[in-house]
Image (cartoon, rainbow, N blue to C red):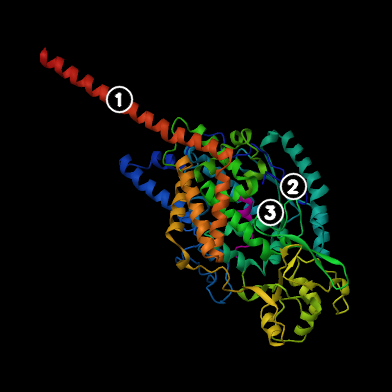
Amino acid sequence: MQDRSPDFRPIPFEGENASPEGHKRERSLLGRIFRHPAVHIPLFLIGMVVLLAAVVLLTEPIARTVSGQASEGSQEIGEDHAASPSANLGDPYTIHGLDIHPDRLFAQYFGGAFSGLDANDEEASFYQDFRWRLEMYERTYGVDDNFTIRVYDGRTGEMLEAYTLRNLKAIYDATGEIDWEDVDFPNRRTHSSRLRDKWEARGIPRDDIVVRWGRANQSLESRERDEPFIQYEINLARRLGLSLLATEIGTVETFNQDHLVSSAGARSRYQLMPDNLRMFDVEQYMVPTVSGGFVQVREENHPLLSMEPSMMIVRAYSNAVGHELPGISAYHTGPGNIFRLYQAYLRAHAARPPVNGHVSDAYMWGVTAGFQRVRAQSSFGPQSRAYVLKAYGALRATENKLIDPARMIRVDRVQVRSGEMITLERILTALDGNTSIDWGAGTDGLSSYERFRRLNPHINLPRDDRGLVPTDGNLRLTSTADGDPLRFFLPDGAVEVLQRVGYDFFSNVFAFNENTYLVNESEITRTDRRYERLVQEAGQFGFTSENKRELDGLVGQLDAMAQRDPSRFRQTQARIARLHRSIWNTSAFRDLAGTAETLLSIVPNRRAVDRELAIADSLAAVAAAEADAEDS
């Protein structure tokens, strides 16, 4: 995946040099802590304490991820928020109160930890820059509607102007309908150019003029589209050890519109490239009908088929690059660009190599003070720079909206048993009139055929308003189609109803309900824990040939375990590790490993030897001087 802008989404106007404090001296997080003027304890002792705390804070999310499990810790929930979901159906809740909210998992970046820093502390500059950008995208996705254009001075973060397309807003307020593409092009684009010219004429350098388009309307629409599936995204993120940022990829990419295809060919609401879809067995094929025709199936158009591949890629990328923040960025820009960002960071700090640093520091630097250096050495562009920030802004936009577990879609993903065939009409006729089956919200009054169409958006069935199953939509359902497994969805309980009337044709029934993706600690093995430790080391710039050899061995073991026990968990572990290994087999990784081993091992060791020699020389000189003094 490269720095791509889908043809359905506008490229934001952003001053590429925009940074309110970007001209100040660059420092790592640990360096800032060690050198802060408030620190009066002896350097060695405070350094050891802070180092231990930083490692725990930064690596704890990863430490419980690689096995695909998340710890069930206590949750800090404000009085104004409902409780988080349990294994069973519960009361409505908000994602603000969940323990996997990034404000909790990554508090040192998102939780306001830097708000109390002295604005004149130059060592905190690029952390302040990062928070400014976070706040900007919070406003973009959660405050400013789709008729707003906001202009900032990128040098200081000052908001210069907020302009509203009043005529278009009045039309939308009166009708409730509008095409957001028409709002953006040419309307907001034209006015954005005018505003840039205006503020440039007033003395703001053009590269420092940052223009942002509000997306609050689309954020709300995106949440509404995701309502049947959001519980599954949360459960899956928890199972894979990811934060809630991973659940916002669909919003950032497409505002959760499943049918959109980018100019680069990325598909689904999660914008997966075709090779990644095939790698995770998300296929396209044709299904025959009783009339002799065929119906197209595009499995990527169903969130319950594309969601798991998307998050597994986020997990694998996060493992490969050492942390979830750059891992989510890698989902958009590619792991190779993240490796090049790390190299730029290490080289920029070659005079003081971050021997005890963490890749999150490098990522923070790369999207703020180091962005121009990174961009010059890679294809990590403005869209890549903003990707994680957009995910956070989208999350904050709807974090206080209630999620009702009762509104999640409950379905069975089924496949007809090998050697059997049944028509869609026979299935729907057997289900007609059965009041025990819940087809989902908004389906009252619809025919069973139209209900099936809504439940299976990946099957391109023709519409029919007569309440019948049209001949060109009456599928001949078998085990496979075009050699691929033919998978479709039935409402919860439908399989049992069909079995009672003698239609016992189904195999591979997978239930999507409140228990799907729940954590099972008993599945974790010592091999999984070894993999966890390897990823933790990667997060501390452990990109070495030795760790690469260990990964190769772990992949072999995880593959063998998955063959012996082909459970969903074991297969997931093996796939994630294989994708991780493929990333570490690239030339970009080899280049990074060379840089990391040189700057974080050879150079520090050489300097340590030089220091020891210098100390020895000094001691020898002192001893010689004392000897001379005694002789005299």
Dot 2 and dot 1 residues touching (CB under 8 Å): no
Mark 3 secondary-structure assignment:
loop
Pinpoint residue 492: horizontal percent, then vertical percent: 66, 78
Amino acid type of the residue tagged 2 in the rendering: Ala
Residue 26 seen in the current view:
no
Mark toward the start of the polypeptide (1 vs 3): 3
Mark 2 residue element: loop
The residue under label 3 is 272
Identify residue for label 1: 613
Q: Residue furthest front?
A: 419
Residue beneath the point at 30% across and 28% down: 612
Residue stretch in magenta: 388-400
Assess disc 2: are there few (<14), some (14-19) or many (≥20) residues with their C-alpha within 10 Å of its C-alpha.
Answer: some
Say if mark 2 contacts mark 3, CB within 8 Å: no
Q: Is residue 389 magenta?
A: yes
Rounded to the nearest angstrom, the CA distance separating label 2 from label 3 is 10 Å
Question: Residue at label 2?
Answer: 264
Residue farthest top in this picture: 632
Relative to 475, is 604 on the left or the right? left
Q: CA distance from mark 1 to mark 3?
A: 55 Å
**Residue 403 visible to the viewer:** yes
**Disc with the residue nearer the chain's start (2 vs 3):** 2
